[in-house]
Image: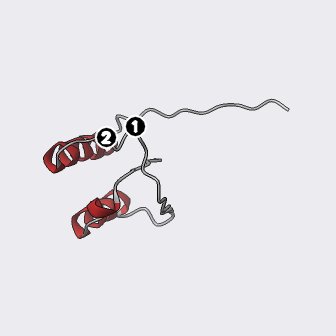
Amino acid sequence: MDAVLKIQSSEFTDELIEKIKGLIRGKENSEITISISEHSSKGILREETREEYFSRLENAIDNLEKGNVVTLSRDYEQ
């Protein structure tokens, strides 16, 4: 499973960390990468209420847990 969660620094809470822990529980070889950027994305970090954001995040986590994911790959020919 690969997942990218883009959040604003103010939304990096203990609750979110616990949810991430739940996603990787029992997966000993999981890798987590944290990237910090001083510039917010104009697309995904649009203006929305805290409730709307967490609703969208909960929906994404539910989809991951159910296996409803889209994997994109590109084969490079050299």
What residue is drawn where x is 46% and y is 66%?
A: 28
Q: State if disc 1 and disc 2 touch (CB < 8 Å).
A: yes
Q: Which residue appears at 26% of the width and 66% of the height?
A: 13
Query: Quick check: 22 above or below 1?
Result: below
Amino acid beneath label 1: Gly
Residue lying at the far left in this picture: please name it.
51
Q: Element at badge 1? A: loop
Q: Which residue is mark 2?
A: 46
Q: Which mark is residue 43?
A: 1
The reply, left or right, for residue 24 in relation to residue 13 is right
Classify mark 2: helix, strand or loop. loop
Q: Nearer the viewer, residue 78 or 29?
A: 78
- Quick check: 61 left or right of 3? left
Q: In this view of the protein, can residue 32 be seen by the observer?
A: no
Residue type of the residue flagged with mark 2: Arg
Q: Position of residue 54 (x, y in %)?
A: 20, 49
Q: Position of residue 38 (x, y in %)?
A: 47, 60
